[in-house]
Image: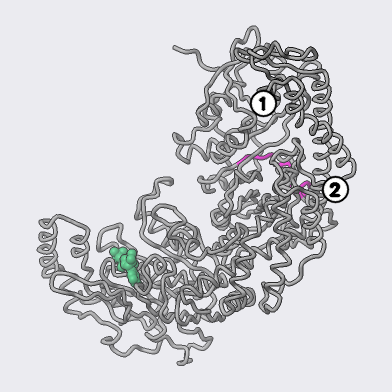
Amino acid sequence: MTAPLLTTTQVNRAALTPMMQHYIETKDQYPHALVLYRLGDFYEAFFEDAQLISRELELVLTGREGGKEIGRIPMAGIPHHALDRYAAQLVEKGFSIAICDQMESAAVAQGLVRREVTRVITPGTVIEEGMLPAKRNNFLVAVVNAAENWGLAYADISTGEFQTTQLRSTEQLVQELLRLQPAEVLLPMDSPNLHGLKEFFKAKNQPEHHPTQDAIAEKREPIELPSAYTKLPDSLCYTQRSQTPFSLAEAKQRLLETFRVRSLEGFGCNALPLAIRASGGLLEYLSATQKNLQTPLQNLSTYTVSDYLLLDHQTRRNLEITQTVRDSTLYGSLLWALDKTTTAMGSRALRRWLLQPLKNIQAIGDRADTVAELSRNHSLRKSLRHVLNQIYDIERLCSRVGAGTANARDLIALAQSLGKLRDVSEVVLDACSPYLIGLQQVPLDLEQLGDRLVNTLVEQPPIYLTEGDLIRAGVNSQLDELRQQAKADLDWLANLEKLERERTGISTLKLGYNKAFGYYISISKGKSDQAPKDYKRKQTLTNEERYVTPELEEREARIAKAKEALNLLEYELFIELRTEVAKHIEPMRAIAQALAAADALCSFAEVAVTYNYCRPVIAENRSIQIKNGRHPVVEQSLPAGFFVPNSVNLGYPLSANPEDTESSPDSEHPDLIVLTGPNMSGKSIFLRQVGLIQLMAQVGSFVPADVANLGLCDRIFTRVGAVDDLATGQSTFMVEMNETANILNHAKETSLVLLDEIGRGTSTFDGMAIAWSVAEYLATALKARAIFATHYHELNELASLLPNVANFQVTVKELEDEIIFLHQVQPGGADRSYGIEVGRLAGLPPTVISRAKQLLAYIDRNSRIATGLRNAGNPSPEKAPAKSKTKPDKAQLSIFDRDI
Ligand SMILES: Nc1ncnc2c1ncn2[C@@H]1O[C@H](COP(=O)(O)OP(=O)(O)OP(=O)(O)O)[C@@H](O)[C@H]1O
């Protein structure tokens, strides 16, 4: 049996070597992070961190002598040049890494080499290009809790965005977290056990697949989590922070100091203590992790969730806004269908917009006006997209400049992008829509900055900053002089081979170079006796002799010295330049945001033109009138012309006066549509397309329809299918009921509710009873605009009982032994589901199909419900008796009261 591996908590610290003691002290300061400790050319991890990285990164676990009494301690390391690659993998897995660098050269160090943590890379604080997804934000969130209320602040340090809000319930907080999908969430919590929080969430979240570093250490007592924290989504990555920086006094002070302001009034959060506390706590975390790499954030801004169209997590998922439900891919989502942006900044903006549609008619109008102009004016759109395509990610380049990690290639990319601003302004010169007017002026200082970068840096600089070849000739006289001096020696060197061949008469003589010996003159063994006297033998190989001459040595030393001086000077000039660029971060970010918005709107226009969308008319009413609407994603995935458009007319206008017949409900403008139709006919697609059209309109996009008159919506709710929620251990039916309860408890007249089957997960009668009463409640008590797709055809009866309910069906053509899906939504209720037919198409064995048909015929003849329905008839709007203009009694109606 192998002995258990040593951990930092078990080891007798006093017996450790001084270096290992320092390692453990460092580890104490960063208990949440993996400490990577620079040793020569490697970053090493020891003890439990070594075991963890060896397993996570598939590295060899070795050992190192830890002290006489200690013996070998576990060690695993990564080569220093591969740090970024390995760090990216660890951060992707949710780990934080403290990089402990050597602060002096081992050659000059007296005693132990001085080492310090120079940076803590955490999932929410990455700025390295290779570690960030280009087309989505990387948010760091901090939250604070007081009773039911929460403060939330979020920042993307790779773009500078910094926002805060206050939320009134844990449910609101959860929804906001799920919208942001942060890379890391900070929770203030004073607890002696620093590992409890991660253990808690990771234990909830597939413990066997995500072993934590804590799980490797010996078992610790679990901590008592504040009950509010236990309701947070366990799919996110949480980091526990001390409560002190989240206190109001500290947080406020930090905000005032960071932004150099006297009051927080300008940020809109002066009266929001929880928002201030969350924001201050977030800033403290940045300074603790970023050390001197801190990049300035934009000024804090405060927002309110109710200012936007609310989409809960379920709805974002069901409408497949950023990824599909089936396999969580971008392909097949709304974002996929609409994202034709040409810049990463535009792509990020479009994604943010889709996840946070607007509720302000003016703001929606500004976007739609711009889409209208870009759709109308093809050459404007084409030219703008062409020039945007040549612009790099200014937002992220700015952050790297601010953090001091930008290299010369980054500055060249920035310069090229700034150089394109003039082209952008020329393209939009005659434009008149809001988002384009803003691009007509190029800030002069940015133009000059771009010119300066182009004139200072060489066109294709290397990645590394210390190897020279960064700065153009003519930029700095000292640099030119040094280069001139070095040039004379280099020219001499270039000529040397020729000269020595002439001098010695050895035509095969060569000048060579290797890292260990530097320059040498090589002569083959056979000719080595002809070597002149001043040749000093340096190395003997099997077939050749290598020599140097005193002059070669002297010139070489001079070249090396000049190169060192040149590299240093170039480095200094570069840093000076980068510092200068950093002073312009604010206006560069502002222009980057304007470009991102223009790009996103160009994308909407491009799709609108390609797929013939219309501009929706948005008003403060409850109407949803869509003529020939299409599903934006399904339409794109089918061959042109294959998608069958459908219309809808929902929501009669509300009036303060109930006697007002003008505003009485009628089947032309129902609040609730009961949608029936065979399996596979297109009910779900129709339902989603209505939701997507409403959402797209409130984002400012055009919509896939011939005409769309849409009232502003405050929330869209959806309930679509269901799968067992393994994470929370809830059954399919429980999930379905939870979601339905949420809708019934929150929907209002101005909401849009889309229900795709309710009550399927239980017995037919229970399910039907629930479906009926839910539909009835929606139509009578909530009067929300709703579409209810169902296979319970019995629900068609509701339309004959309630004036604001109408029946629609998706039609099929029935041939002898086959049905043809027409995908047309028409008034009336279906009375068959053709489920057996779909089963046949899916390949159920013929025996099963014919037996099912036999049973269906039997049930149809003998079931009480079926018989009752036949007796009662199956009213459709056309057949239904004229509806009473008075509103129905609010008391619950029951299908069981009817004669069935
Ligand atoms: N309007 C349409 N035009 C063309 N094809 C359509 C249309 N609507 C739906 N379809 C096609 O029909 C398929 C089935 O549609 P959908 O999933 O909406 O059916 P459904 O009625 O909800 O079925 P079920 O009751 O079995 O859930 C879709 O995948 C799509 O390919």
Residue 425 at least partly seen:
yes
Q: Quadrant of the N terminus?
A: top left
- Residue 273, horizontal then vertical, whole percent: 72, 55
In terms of image quarters, where does ligand 1 lie? bottom left
Q: Nearer the viewer, residue 708 or 59?
A: 59
Label disc, if present, on residue 475 of the rendered structure: 2
Q: Amino acid at mark 1?
A: Tyr
Position of residue 884 in the picture relative to residue 140 (left or right): left
Name the residue beneath numbered marker 1: 37
User: Who's the residue at 17% across and 69% down the image?
Assistant: 818
Q: Nearer the viewer, residue 133 or 564?
A: 564
Helix, strand or loop at disc 1? strand
Label 1 residue near ligand 1, CB within 8 Å: no
Specify the segment rendered in magenta: 239-251
Residue 224 at least partly seen:
no
Label disc, if present, on residue 541 of the rendered structure: none
- Residue 353, horizontal then vertical, whole percent: 58, 64
Question: Callout 2: 10 Å neighbours few (<14), some, many (20+)?
Answer: few
Q: Nearer the viewer, residue 868 or 597?
A: 597
Q: Is residue 654 above or below residue 201?
A: below
Q: Is residue 570 above or below residue 778?
A: above
- Residue 707 painted magenta: no
